[in-house]
Each structure stands twice: as C-alpha cells, then as structure tokens.
C-alpha cells in the first residue's frame, strides 16, 4: 500500500497507538483477535476489491461533484412537479438549525443530555397539533404513506375490523405503502383495502359510492384533503359523519401547507390525521425530505395504538422547569418486540425539528398568507393554461395541484414533457398511466415559488410545443 | 409557545403579483366556505431573531455526538460524519424525485455504484435497494419480501413462522410480526451467551418462513455456527435475513454471503457515517441474492445501455415501502465516505473498532461494580456490561450512572433493549472515531462515578447536578389524565401533571 496508513477519520490508525493498544490487550495484530472470535472458514482471506480511496477532501469533492455535474434541479429548471414532494421555499433559518451539529448528529441520548432535542421534537408535536387542531401527535415517521399505513392499522386494531376505505384518487405509491402495511401472512388477518370512487366532474369523493361501500366491517374511512390530484375535498364533515355512523374512524390525510386556509381535521371532527411535513421547511432532496406525521384526538384507546414514540411534557424537582418523557412506551417495539403495536425505528427526527422551526417562523399569519398566495397562483396558472388550444383543466376546486389534460392536442404527456425539458421546464408528472380515466393528463403543481413570469413562461412554452 | 407575542412574524411570504390577484380575486373566492379554516392555528408569533435564538439555544441544550465522547451508545455506531459530505448533500437540495432520469444521471450513478460496487463487495449480495428509510424499515422490507417469496411459491399459508434471537434487535421480531408472521425467539446459552444451536434445531420446521438475526449479537458475541444456522433454515425451506444494522467491526472481515444469508441490510446512518439526525432520516440499505432480486421494492436503479434508469417494471416486486427512492442524500454521504476510505480504510475502520472494544474491555474490567456477563471471552464491537454488582453493593444502578455521567460532559449511554436479560445493563460501542485518549477519559468517568457510588451513593442517585434540568419529578406518561403530547393538551390538563 503506497498511501499513508493514518486515516483522518480514524485516530487510532496511528501505527504506534494501535500497537500500544494491541499490546495492552495481548494480541499481535487484528487478525489474531478476529481469529479468536470468528471461525476461519468465515473470514475473508483477501482484501476487498474496491476503488482506490480519495484520501484528500479536495479530491473527494472533485470526484463526487464531477459525477453530479451534469445533473439539473428545480433551481435551474422551472418545475411544476409535485405529487408528494413539493418545491416550497425553505427559509434560511431552517437550514441554519438543520445544520447545527448538535441536532444533526444526536441520536439516542437521554433527556438530561439532549434536552434541547426532546423539547424541539415536543414543539414539533405541539405545532402540528395546532395546525391540524388535535391534541395528540408523535415523533414523525418516514413519509405520508407510512403515516397513513400506521393510521389505518390503528383504526383496525381499535375497532377489531378488517376493512378500510381509501379514495380512488390516492397516489398509487402511497396506496402501495398502505397495502404492504395491510397485507398479512394469513389472508383473514389482512386488512382489506377498498377504494371509493370520485366524482368525475369535481374530483371530490363520491359520497354515494362511500355510502354504498361502508359497512359495519369498516374500520376506517381514509380520505385526503387536498387529494393527490389536488382537489380540495369539500365534504370532509360529511365523510366524517358517515364514518362515525358506521362505528368507523375518520382518518384524514392532509398537506399541512394548506392548513393556514383550509379547514383542519380537528374542525371537521376527524379522529386520526396524517400527512407529509416536507412542505414545512424541508428541502426536496430527491425525495429524501419526506417526513410523515400522525395526530389524533386525545383518547386512550387511540394513544395506546400508536406505533411511534411520543413525547409527553412533565415537570422536574424545580418549580417551573419542564422535562419530557416517552408516553405509553411499553406499546412500542423497543419494549414489546413482536407483541408491540407494529414497529418503530429511526425515522425523521431532524425534519421534525426543522419543521418546528418553519411553523414558528410562519406563525398563523404566514401560513394563511402562504396558502392564499398559492391558491391565487395555482388558479391563475390553470386559467392561463386553459387558454392554450387543446389544453383543459378538468377540476375547479383545487389547492396547489391540478391535472392538466392534453387529449385535444393529440400529444402524449410524456412527449410534451420531453419537449418542455428542452426548454428547461419540468412539466407536471404524467398521471395518464395512473389514472387512465383522466386521459393524457399531467399533474401540475404551483407553489409560492412561482412568479407570474414563470407561469407565463410555461404557457408560452406549451404553445410552442403543442 | 409561551414566547408568542401577537403581531410579530418570523418571515414574510412572497407577494402575489397584482395581475394575478386581479385575475382570480380573493383566495376566499376560490375555496368553498365550508372548506375554509374557521379558527387560525395557534402557532407562535415571533420575530425571526427570536425564533433563531430559541432553536439555537435548544441546540445548545443538546449534547449530540460531536461535542462529546459519544461511545456509550452501543448498537448505534456513533461515528464521525465527515463535514465535507454535508456540502455534497446541500447540492442536491432542489432535486425533485420525479424529475426526468436524464436530469439526474449523476445521482442515479451514485446510488447504483454504492450498491453494486461497495455493498456488493462488503456483503457478497447481488442486488440492492435504498428505499427503506431506516433499519427497522429495512427489516420490515425484508419481511415483506419474505412474505411475497413464499406467496409466489404457494407456501405462505404453511410458512408462518419467523425465527429470531433475543439479542437481535427488537425490530427483528416486531417487523415480521407486523407482516403477519408468528415469532419464535431463541435465547442464548445462559452460561456462555452463545446463540443456542440446539434450540434452533428444535425451532426449525416446515412452518419456518425464515430467520431474522443479528451477528454479532448485542452482547458482542459472534455466533461461530452462523453458517450452520442458515443451512438449517434453508434445509426446511426458509430464507435468512441478516440484520447488519451495525456491521462496523466486520467490514472486509466476514460477509453475509459466506455465512449463507439470502438478504441483509446495513444502516447507512451507522456503519456508513451518515449523521443520525436526531433519529433520522437514515437508510437501511438492503442487499439480496439474485434469486430475490425480483421482489425488491420499486423503483430499482439499473444500468442499461450506458445509462441509469429507475426500473418500475417488476411484476413480482413488493411495491413500495417508502415513497420515491428513499433517503438518497444518505446514500450520497455513504458513497462519499466509502470513496474516502477505500478497501484498506474500511478494513482499518473495522479493525480499529474491534481493537478499541478490546481495549475498553480491559479498562472497564478494572472498574469496581462493573461485570461482563457470559463466559464467552471474545466480543467483537461491543459488550453488554452489567452494573448488577454495583447496584447490590451500593444501591446505585444503571439509571443513576446514566444520569451522573452527564455531569462530566459525557453523553448518556445505551442500556439495552427489552427485556433486560442482562440485569442493570449498559452497552458502549467504541467505534473507530474515538481515540485512545477518548476511551481513557470515558472510562475515567465511569471509574469516578463508581468511586462515588461506593463512597457517596446519594450523590449519584440524585444526579444530574450539572444538566439543563433537574431530575424529573413526576412521570405522567401512562396516565391519560396527565399525559400531554402537545402544548395545547398540557394547557388543558395543567394542574394535573
């Protein structure tokens, strides 16, 4: 080996130190120690065949940045992509806190050593509680799909029923995650996932179909607001009532960025709520910014069924001091193993902290203004798009996303998106395969990042390519 | 939230162009009245500097990993996360996961190569997925693959049992159970601590769907018959999934392939240096043998015709366990870390971690009241120690020690998952990040607290004395009338807590 044996990330790779430590433990070398613990037949007898290391930090940066050099992103292209990961603005303060090494590198420290981490995550629970208007929340999970999977399993366990209803407009990826949660080795133990149709005119849930499908076997009605296709669900209270009339839980999936203007689940009486916190100050990171949250009414039967860890506030020996601890910890898999309420693990702690910062920065006024601005921009975009020949927008009551139909242009969405790409525009996600009934449609997303000139540019580009 | 000052705000949102406003009118005209929020959310109203100060202070009240010697958290591999990798990750902040593949060839190349170059060589597995966003998520992913495999083979009804060991992570039991399997848990030989091969012989049957197991176990004991174990499971038609959440001290030393496993996973936020992020985002990088590749979650990153693609066309795929591609930024960091290490560096990290543990063992054995349970001498990466003797002799137990070490600026340590087979357990893991001086200091803290326990036990029992808060007085955590998972619930229940 030509290169130095001392590695900057390994202090004890200094040969003299290593030798001294080996002397202390009475061994000649590492091989001797390994051979005392691992049978000869299982020991790797050759060096690993891997690329030569880039020991200098500068060389490493050149190498990795060189690979990524040809990539493009949504700061360089004008993007209308959404569908579960959204291009919202991330305030600088969020990045400052996200990069604090204490939060970035903390893990399993206790409340006395990592009090700040406990409090910041407790604040996340509290602020989510305010936004969704519910009293219980927990440490976040991986993404909206995982949160929804947890929520419907909670509903099934409490009711003892094995069926959930989900909207047909659900994201197919999210449905796949939920289905994996609901399937079981023994088919009778599986939770049966049934879809409820939507009104082709409005995109809202088809109440008639819901009433036809719900029964005393239904554990929960899962519905979304806004839906995956962007539509604001105007019948949340009605859906909730129908669920309750059948002894089922109303489980709402929400985009929290909408909740400065849209009615929160607590207002319409939902029992459990879930959603995706990525819009709350978390970068998209090619999907790595996902952060699912769960909240519910403060009922013992529900709290006892959460799979995730949840923090409760408490007091200390000194008046006025707050401490934190794990509520009903025995239900988690850390304690109960196979008897636990599902499973729990490392999820998205850092994103909980970042979104707490975001919600604190925004306040009620910021959340309302942001939501209003998004509504105005998205509706303006839709109007402009409809002025393009052959382009239509099938649904009216949407928040920030809406399908744009290109059937009358005779072109496929994939083809249009490829042409837009040449103009440095990411067109809306092609949903024509996921929702064939919508024809050749792209799901367009408009956020506070879009200016009027961005929207004009899209329309101009479409006029050119269609 | 107590700090709120009505009227203040932390940030101004971008103004809507007048032309847009004129064209569409008020936002309220775009939403049905019934769908509008009636009461504003009770978020705090604070200026930007106040928000920043508050969270900076909270960060300062967090010891984390980088400010101290965090070698006490065994099974978690609290290793250094190189700062340069954070800069690399910042460059992918604005990538949308549904962008055209053409625009993220570099990112896909990194994901592909991290699997097919690095993890392939480290594990001996053939195909990889980084969609599972954590270690438990990877175990769950593998349980769902196992379910699908037996379903496709028409044997799922018959094969409903999963075998694990009590010193494997609890998720190795909980995740298969969530997928619908029954669990059979094997306990170690009480004398040696070695996984009990006779118990496995008795456990395997035509009902066995597979095995989920850690090796070395939480005790640091490496099962020397692990290849026999996988063989026994295979002989009855089961699959073997290797929990390599923490494989830090065996990289380049021994592999999943030679031990006979069909699947494995690595926690990239442990062994592969991605920061733990206050408990995520992480990644459980899954590797499988060729026979199981068809079951991996979609999309799978493939290399065809000189380009990288996201392959969704996999009829036997389990579908999704996480939206999009998972936590790609974690893969990027891990790739960069491996490129900085190379084959020799990875092996060096493993060797030094193992040697550090031997050194720590020698030093800790000198501390009064600390014992090493089980007669098996060799422990690879960590040891589950016991303070039972100290507890009996002084009344000071592991909970007291865990509070007292904080007074000396050391992060609290990991005790054990439940059940506590080892009484008064604690499980340090001195990975390659820590210098000899670090280890010496850490042991000196334990030594000092031991001295205190034997001379002034109340000093330890009443700890912490130098932390941000004093000892927690009440524990309302199981009482519905007193628990408060949000501030609004606290305000409603105040007085009861």
Image (cartoon, helix red, strand yellow):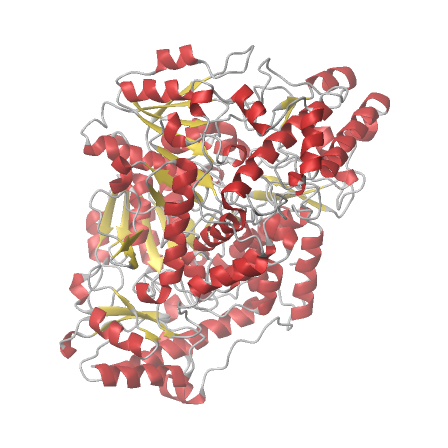
Q: Nearer the viewer, residue A146 or A248?
A: A146
Residue lying at the far right in this picture: please name it: B455
Q: Is residue B2 visible?
A: no
Q: Nearer the viewer, residue B163 or B333?
A: B333
Name the spot of residue A258 as percent of width and height, x first.
Answer: 43, 66
**Left or right: residue B25 compared with residue B428:** left
**Left or right: residue B384 compared with residue A197:** right
Q: Is residue B61 above or below residue B199?
A: below
For the image, the number of numbered tags is: 0
Name the spot of residue A180 as percent of width and height, x first.
Answer: 31, 42
Quadrant containing the C terminus of chain A in the rendered view: bottom left
Name the spot of residue A374 as percent of width and height, x first.
Answer: 42, 74
Question: Residue at left 44%, top 45%?
Answer: A50
Name the spot of residue B417 as percent of width and height, x first.
Answer: 55, 28
Q: Is residue B335 above or below residue B150?
A: below
Q: Nearer the viewer, residue B176 or B483?
A: B176
Q: Quadrant of residue B119?
A: top left
Q: Quadrant of residue B480?
A: top right
Quadrant containing the N terminus of chain A in the rendered view: top right
Q: Quadrant of residue B306?
A: bottom left
Question: Residue at left 19%, top 75%?
Answer: A406
Q: Is residue B463 above or below residue A313?
A: above
**Left or right: residue B47 compared with residue A151:** right
Q: Is residue B496 visible?
A: yes
């Amino acid at each position: 080996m030509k290169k130095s044996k001392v590695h900057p990330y390994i202090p004890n790779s200094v040969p003299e130190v290593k030798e001294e430590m080996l002397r202390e433990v009475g061994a000649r070398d590492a091989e001797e120690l390994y051979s005392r613990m691992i049978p000869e037949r299982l020991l790797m007898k050759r060096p690993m065949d891997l690329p030569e290391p880039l020991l200098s930090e500068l060389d490493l940066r050149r190498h990795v940045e060189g690979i990524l050099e040809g990539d493009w992103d949504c700061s360089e292209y004008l993007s209308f992509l959404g569908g579960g990961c959204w291009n919202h603005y991330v305030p600088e303060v969020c990045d400052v806190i996200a990069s604090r090494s204490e939060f970035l590198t903390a893990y399993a420290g206790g409340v006395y050593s990592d009090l700040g981490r406990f409090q910041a995550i407790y604040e996340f629970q509290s602020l989510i509680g305010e936004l969704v208007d519910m009293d219980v929340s927990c440490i976040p999970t991986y993404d909206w799909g995982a949160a929804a999977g947890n929520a419907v399993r909670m509903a099934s366990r409490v009711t003892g029923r094995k069926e959930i209803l989900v909207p047909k407009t659900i994201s197919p990826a999210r449905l796949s995650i939920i289905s994996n949660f609901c399937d079981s080795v023994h088919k009778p133990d599986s939770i049966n996932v049934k879809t409820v149709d939507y009104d082709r005119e409005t995109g809202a849930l088809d109440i008639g179909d819901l009433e036809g499908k719900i029964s005393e076997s239904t554990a929960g009605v899962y519905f979304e607001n806004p839906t995956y296709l962007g539509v604001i669900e105007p019948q949340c209270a009605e859906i909730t009532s129908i669920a309750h009339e059948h002894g089922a839980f109303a489980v709402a999936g929400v985009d929290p960025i909408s909740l400065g203007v849209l009615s929160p689940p607590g207002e319409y009486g939902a029992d459990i709520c879930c959603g995706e916190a990525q819009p709350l100050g978390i970068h998209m990171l090619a999907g790595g910014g996902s952060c699912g949250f769960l909240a519910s009414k403060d009922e013992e039967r529900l709290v006892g069924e959460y799979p995730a860890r949840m923090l409760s506030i408490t007091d200390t020996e000194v008046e006025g001091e707050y401490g934190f601890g794990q509520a009903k910890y025995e239900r988690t898999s850390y304690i109960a193993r196979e008897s636990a309420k599902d499973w729990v693990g490392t999820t998205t702690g850092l994103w909980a902290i970042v979104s707490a910062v975001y919600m604190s920065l925004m306040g009620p006024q910021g959340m309302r203004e942001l939501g209003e601005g998004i509504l105005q921009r998205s509706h303006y975009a839709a109007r402009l798009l409809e002025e393009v020949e052959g382009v239509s927008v099938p649904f009216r009551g949407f928040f920030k996303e809406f399908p744009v139909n290109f059937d009358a242009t005779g072109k496929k969405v994939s083809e249009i998106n490829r042409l837009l790409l040449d103009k440095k525009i990411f067109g809306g996600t092609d949903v024509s395969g996921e929702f064939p009934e919508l024809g050749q449609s792209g799901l367009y997303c408009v956020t506070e990042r879009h200016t009027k000139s961005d929207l004009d540019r899209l329309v101009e580009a479409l006029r050119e390519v269609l | 939230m107590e700090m709120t000052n009505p009227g203040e705000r932390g940030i101004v949102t971008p103004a809507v162009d007048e032309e847009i406003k004129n064209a569409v009118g008020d936002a309220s005209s775009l939403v049905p009245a019934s769908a509008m929020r009636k009461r504003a959310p009770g978020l705090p109203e604070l200026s930007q500097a106040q928000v920043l100060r508050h969270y900076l202070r909270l960060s300062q009240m967090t010891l984390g990993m980088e400010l101290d010697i965090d070698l006490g958290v065994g099974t978690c591999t609290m290793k250094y996360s190189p700062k340069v990798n954070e800069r690399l990750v910042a460059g992918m902040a604005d990538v949308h996961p549904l962008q055209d593949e053409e625009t993220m060839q570099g990112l896909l190349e990194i994901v592909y190569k991290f699997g097919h170059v690095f993890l392939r060589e480290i594990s001996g597995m053939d195909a990889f997925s980084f969609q599972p966003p954590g270690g438990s998520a990877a175990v769950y992913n593998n349980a769902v693959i196992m379910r699908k495999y037996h379903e496709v083979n028409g044997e799922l009804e018959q094969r409903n049992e999963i075998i694990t060991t009590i010193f494997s992570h609890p998720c190795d039991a909980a995740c298969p159970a969530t997928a619908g399997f029954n669990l059979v848990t094997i306990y170690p030989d009480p004398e040696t601590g070695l996984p009990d091969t006779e118990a496995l012989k008795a456990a395997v049957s035509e009902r066995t769907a597979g095995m989920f197991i850690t090796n070395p176990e939480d005790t640091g004991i490496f099962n020397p018959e692990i290849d026999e174990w996988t063989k026994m499971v295979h002989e009855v038609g089961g699959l073997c999934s290797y929990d390599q959440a923490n494989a830090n001290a065996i990289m380049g030393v021994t592999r999943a392939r030679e031990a006979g496993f069909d699947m494995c996973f690595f926690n990239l936020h442990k062994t592969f240096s991605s920061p733990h992020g206050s408990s995520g985002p992480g990644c459980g990088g899954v590797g499988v043998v060729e026979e199981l590749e068809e079951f991996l979650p979609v999309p799978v990153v493939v290399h065809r015709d000189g380009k990288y693609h996201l392959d969704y066309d996999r009829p036997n795929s389990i579908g999704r366990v996480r939206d999009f591609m998972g936590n790609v930024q974690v893969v990027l960091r891990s790739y960069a870390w491996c490129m900085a290490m190379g084959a020799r560096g990875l092996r060096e990290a493993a060797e030094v971690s193992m040697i550090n543990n031997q050194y720590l063992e020698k030093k800790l054995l000198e501390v009064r009241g600390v014992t090493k349970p089980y007669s098996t001498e060799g422990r690879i990466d960590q040891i589950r120690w016991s303070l039972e003797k100290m507890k009996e002799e002084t009344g000071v137990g592991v909970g007291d020690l865990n509070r007292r070490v904080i007074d000396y600026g050391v992060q609290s340590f990991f005790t054990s998952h439940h059940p506590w087979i080892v009484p008064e357990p604690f499980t340090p893991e001195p990975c390659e990040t820590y210098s000899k001086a670090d280890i010496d200091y850490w042991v000196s803290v334990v030594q000092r607290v031991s001295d205190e326990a034997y001379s002034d036990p109340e000093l330890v029992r009443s700890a912490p004395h130098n932390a941000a808060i004093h000892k927690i007085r009440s524990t309302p955590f199981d009482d519905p009338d007193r628990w408060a998972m949000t501030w609004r619930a606290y305000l409603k229940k105040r007085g009861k807590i």
